[in-house]
Image (cartoon, rainbow, N blue to C red):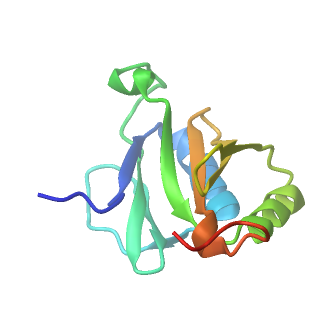
Amino acid sequence: MQVSGLNHYTLRCTPDELRLLHDFYVGCLQLHAGDRPTMPAPGYWLYSGERPIVHLYASLTGSEAGATAALDHISFSTHGLEATRAHLKAKGIAFDEAPVPGWPIHQIFVRDPLGLKIELTFDLDKEGAPGHDQSH
């Protein structure tokens, strides 16, 4: 077995939180809602290109802590560092940046409306960052 990346992540929420989460993931991460099988509770499958990578499922009657309380963050492989900074600033979305010393990785962190930390991971070798050695 070889894991090659994130397939999807499911966020359970209340029906009242559903639109708020949808709007965040569409507005901040520029995902789009797409086809979703019929399920017992309302929700969305949010796509990046052809892949549904975030599933929203409004099956809770109230916000509750659970096994995911220990979850620190979800990371998405992302491209376009400068464009992402500009997009987040234009949307008024607060973010923190964390370059990884000694690695060609740059991270931007945002929080969704429920407080979940989202990491946007940029491979600087693929970004063509000025002054970054792309020879390895």
Q: Quadrant of residue 125?
A: bottom right
Quarter in which the N terminus is drawn: bottom left
Residue drawn at the location 79% of the way across and 71% of the way down: 130
63 above or below 90? above
Direction left: furthest residue: 1
Residue 118 placement, left or right of 129: left
Residue 30 visible, this angle: no
90 above or below 66? below
Q: Where residue 92 sits in the image (x, y, percent)?
A: 86, 52
Residue 11 visible, this angle: yes
Camera-side residue of 26 and 13 = 26
Camera-side residue of 28 and 132 = 132
Residue drawn at the location 26% of the way across and 57% of the way down: 39
Q: Where residue 122 sits in the image (x, y, percent)?
A: 61, 61
101 above or below 106? above
Q: Where residue 73 sits in the image (x, y, percent)?
A: 50, 37
